[in-house]
Amino acid sequence: MAKKQFKSESKRLLDLMINSIYTHKEIFLREIISNASDAIDKLCFLSLTDDKVGMSREDFKINLKADKDNRILTIEDNGIGMDRDDLENNLGTIASSGSYKFRNQLEEKDKENVDIIGQFGVGFYSAFMVADEINVITKKYGCDTAYCWKSSGADGYTIKECDKDSVGTQVILHIKPDAEGENYSEFLDQYRLQGLVKKYSDYIHYPIIMDMETQKPKEGTEDKENPEYETVYETTTLNSMTPIWQKNKKEVSQEDYNSFYKEKFFDYEDPLCTISTSVEGVVTYKALLFIPSKAPYDYYTKEFKKGLKLYSSGVLIMDNCEELLPEHFRFVRGVVDSQDFSLNISREVLQHDRQLKTIAKTLEKKIKNELASMLKKDREKYETFWGQFGRQIKYGIVSEYGLHKDLLQDLLLFYSSTEKKLVTLSEYVDRMKEEQKYIYFAAGESVDTIDKLPQTEILRDKGYEILYCSEDIDEFTLQGLGKYADKTFRSVANDDLGLEDDEKKEDENKEDNTAVLNFVKETLGDKVNEVAASKKLVSHPVCLTAKGGISFEMEKYFAQVQPDSGMKAQRVLELNLEHPAVKAMSDSIGSDDEKAKLYAELLYDQALIIAGLPIENPSDYADLVCKLMK
Ligand code: ADP
């Protein structure tokens, strides 16, 4: 019988498929099994209204058979089957609209990395990645004749009548011989096949069965010390059929969720939080989400890939669908299952898919609410979460020009000077004093260093609470927020702390101090941008503050991540003119300028040390101290 040619587009795709160096060849099994499941769906549906089908739901199954000796893998279903026209139309053409795009992708250089085949639904043809010949023996429900479709790839196919008793389809794959770097025999190995079914098709709702070879003690020899073994075949159902997320919440224990999580997401620890949700409406879906107890070791690196597993009626269609999660919740793991997506959906289509966006939006809200409720009801647990992923939430505030700040601001925690523990912004605002204008924060390397910052003194004396920014991202976060509950954030380093008696003090100080301030500025030269009379120091003589938008902590951060950015804080040396040490200096001006200069340098170095900044030249500093001790 003359061979028929594939339609041209299909032919080119086939060529590529056959010669593909694609690394995820294993997905062919998922595709063939999904087709089988769809075919069963169709007949099963018919059986509801047509008594003649003579089958009930339990009778349907998909059978795998691996014949190692002849290198044949058969996938058989008792679904609807195909007649000559179906074979012609379905297996002679690649119907999927994604095929063209798929071909383009395959031709691109990045063949190895992307899981493209799965996303393009070119289904059946993917079997040519592992098989050099495919026979499809099939009999359609309601037909008397069975057909055999046969093809060895790009040169075409034949369709012949053949014998087959029952309705359904057998896809017979002649597995390619092993070649250098390519092990095709693995697709004949029962355990490998079992693993693939578990991985990709676990939740197909018909049993996928295989006769598995095992060794059992021979009958009558079990009790003996050295029992004799024989090879037996046990019919094994490879898939669990009901996805855990499809089950009623009440039927599933936390233990079940935990083991599902650990197995699916390769974690050793139980999840910190499990979120199960079911939505019906514009888009219908079920989702099962987890927040890990610990950030994976590569979490804050580029290696970490965010995303949820996307299923369509129990069939995995995308292992890591990034579009389902916003960046700020990228730590969430889980699955989404929606019958509203077809298996054929391509990645490009998905990216712009409205339904997907709707799901992503509702999931974002759900995750936020879950975290907010954890914060309210189980503070300890929330702090565990915060320790692992708090940084991510802070990034979320800063990113995309503050687009997400309303969503995220109530999830923030900062260490409080008065409470000596982590507090929320709303708790802070509730405790604010009546006359207090701003939400104050102080930045430093650790809680301990911030605790001792001289510039916080005046606020402490007033009993004002200060939030501590000890992580490099903290100040950026507060700057990004700008305001909370209509209260502006203000750094303790700011000149103007908005305290009522400040202005009075400033007026009193102004005139008589210009000479002292100028003297110090001249002595220090470019080391500081400004020397000022402090409004905030009480018992300390000096402190260094930063003017403008960049603080010292930000300067340190930039020095690490972008050394040539030139981002430097503008240094202001604040002097407490009432302090005896500063007085000692000002008294020497005029009478002993040399000594006054040494004092000024010393005070500046002290300010550097307290701010946690390096002294420019430690040995000069040591000399300076020695000179004064003489
Ligand atoms: P699709 O993405 O449409 O499943 P495939 O290339 O995988 O694309 O399959 C093409 C078509 O061939 C299917 O849509 C279906 O109509 C038919 N088909 C494939 N396998 C079977 C089967 N086991 N039983 C019945 N029909 C099948």
Image: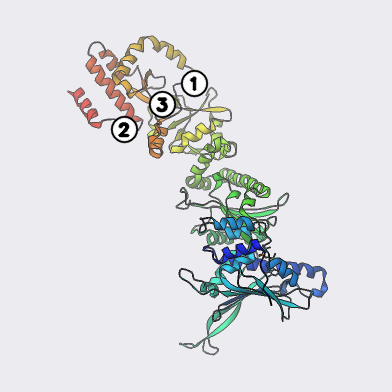
Going 20% across and 27% down the picture, which residue do you hit?
Answer: 623
Give the Cα separation between the discs numbered 2 and 3. Answer: 15 Å
Q: In 3D space, how far apart are the residues under numbered discs 3 and 1 (Cα atoms)?
A: 16 Å
- In this view, the residue farthest toward the top is 511
Q: Earlier in the sequence, mark 1 or mark 2?
A: 1
The Cα–Cα distance between marks 1 and 2, rounded to whole angstroms, is 30 Å
The x, y position of residue 4, in whole percent, is 68, 71
Query: Which of disc 1 and disc 3 is earlier in sequence?
Result: 1
- Circle 3 SS class: strand
Q: Quadrant of residue 377?
A: top right
**Quadrant location, ligand no. 1:** bottom right
Residue under numbered circle 3: 546
Mark 2 or mark 3, earlier in chain: 3
Residue 320: tell me if it is visible: yes
Residue at the outermost bottom position: 220
Query: Which numbered disc, 3 or 1, marks the residue closer to the eye?
Result: 3
Q: Which labelled disc corresponds to residue 614?
A: 2
Q: Amino acid at mark 3?
A: Ala
Q: How many labels sit on residues?
A: 3
Disc 3 + disc 1, Cβ < 8 Å? no
Q: Nearer the viewer, residue 277 or 254?
A: 277
Q: Residue at x 33, y 29 (%)?
A: 608
